[in-house]
Amino acid sequence: MISRRQAARALVSLFGAAPFLHSEGPIPSDPAAIDWNDPLYGPVSVMDFAAVAKTKLDPLAWDYLEGGSEDELTLRENLSAYGNWIIRPRMLTDVHKIDTSLELLGAKLDYPILLDPAGGKNCFHQAGELAVSRAAANARALHITNGGIDDLIDSGAAPTFWQLTTGGQLLNAATMRAFVKRLEAQGCRGICFTVDIMHVSKREREMRNKLERSWCETGIPARGGTGRLPVAKNPWRAGIWPSRPQPTPTWDTLSELCAMTKLPVIVKGIMTAEDGDRCVKHGAKAVIVSNHGARQLDQVGATIEALPEVVAAVSGRIPVLLDGGIRRGTDVLKALAIGAKAVCVARPYLYGLTAFGERGVERVLQILKSELALSMGLAGVANLAAIDPSLVRRKTR
Ligand SMILES: Cc1cc2nc3c(=O)[nH]c(=O)nc-3n(C[C@H](O)[C@H](O)[C@H](O)COP(=O)(O)O)c2cc1C
């Protein structure tokens, strides 16, 4: 018997991809094949893409993309804390060839940069999830998806991890099993379990803007002649006293989930040594040191600051990944030196998506990947195995 996925693949190869599977990429990797006058090649860094993205978005959507929670202290720290680490470059090593490839949970990757899950992409680009997943496939990157890309997955075009929310899928063993079964049938690579979002956080930009929550799915409506948006029926608000109708997941839930699937379960949202150790003990196959892009609990510190303690506690038993504030290849290099196996990014590719759609996502990944390779070449490390803690030191004040 052939699986649903195999059947869909066969259909696609018979009749060609359906229009919605049409890809704008891949963009050229050979500099000689690039039209450097194409506006896609105007921005030269991730933050250049942010500047373009800002001009293209309604201010409400920009705030939703860029913002964090409460005082946004963590948001600023996620970015600035990379400056607390200094690279210790090695001279006269042979760096004529740079190899950024690695193996992560059985997947062979060309480079250690993954795409994080991000909800509400339609605020930035219609059918944004599909565009990101197609770009990830073109760029040969792993995409942790929020879902809604079943056709793309069935076509075999998306090398994909799945995000598991803390919502309906975890209600009980039956809903969990149904979810896991579906992902396994789709040939999904793994399950990402986000653990830092048990309550709606206090996002004060969204509250002040009265962002209608459904606009995260439909996109921000066009402003009429008055320049006003429709009045939100369900504006963003944090609960007066937070509560959820059902009990929230616990470590037992993680054990249960890990026991019912052969897919690796990756826990996203770990910030302490104790929780890193618990992840291993409860069956996780990897952890992502993450503070949700500073969009959940504020004042938890930068992820790069939390990385050393999680790496020490996990002690090589499972891979540790990191996200939060990665904007440069040097940020990636530092995270790898401190002990991350790979990093994930969200806002960087969302800037690319907003600015240029699918090709923008690809170009941002290309820039980050090239910056990483270049930084490795300049720091005297020809491959990822050569990157170790001696490549960085803490800045002395
Ligand atoms: C617009 C937006 C939406 C996000 N939605 C989700 C989500 O649905 N699930 C999740 O686990 N993380 C979500 N995140 C957090 C990211 O997955 C990631 O942890 C974080 O943004 C990484 O930091 P960076 O944006 O500085 O790269 C979101 C982030 C952004 C910016």
Image: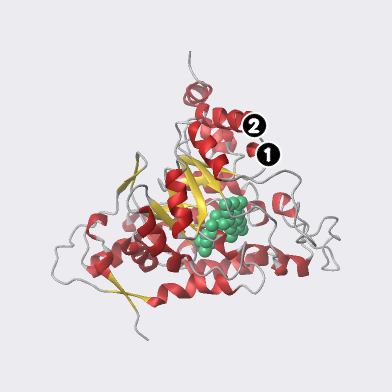
Residue 72 % position (x, y): 61, 72
In which image quadrant can residue 58 be found? bottom right
Residue at 78%, 60% in the rendered image:
241
Q: Do the residues labelled 1 and 2 touch (CB within 8 Å)?
A: yes
Residue 68, located in which quarter of the rendered image? bottom right
The local crowd at label 2, few if under 14, some if 14 to 19, many if 20 or more residues have their Cα within 10 Å, is few
Which secondary structure lies at badge 1? helix
Q: Residue at x 29, y 65 (%)?
A: 374
**The C terminus - image quarter:** bottom left
User: Is ligand 1 closer than 8 angstroms to the Cβ of mark 2?
Assistant: no
Between residue 345 and residue 245, name the one nearer to us: 245
The yes-or-no answer for disc 1 within 8 Å of ligand 1 is no
Q: In this view of the protein, can residue 40 be seen by the observer? A: yes
Q: Where is residue 145 in the image (x, y as percent from the top left)?
A: 55, 45
Q: In the displayed image of the protein, which residue is found farthest to the bottom?
A: 397
Residue type of the residue flagged with mark 1: Gly
- Residue 60: % across, % down: 72, 65
Q: Name the residue under label 2.
A: 175
- Residue at image coords 68%, 55%: 199
Residue 50 pos. (x, y %): 55, 68
Question: Based on the displayed image, in which of its 4 quarters is residue 335 positioned?
Answer: bottom left
Vertical arrangement, residue 62 with respect to residue 144, above or below = below
In this rendered view, identify the residue nearer to me: 172 or 50.
172
Q: Mark 1 points at which residue?
A: 168
CA gap, disc 1 to disc 2? 7 Å
Q: Which residue is located at x 57 percent, y 40 percent?
A: 253
- Determine whether 7 is above or below 240 in the image: above
Residue found at the very far top of the displayed protein: 1
Q: Nearer the viewer, residue 26 or 165?
A: 165
Q: Is residue 347 visible?
A: no
Quadrant assignment for ligand 1:
bottom right
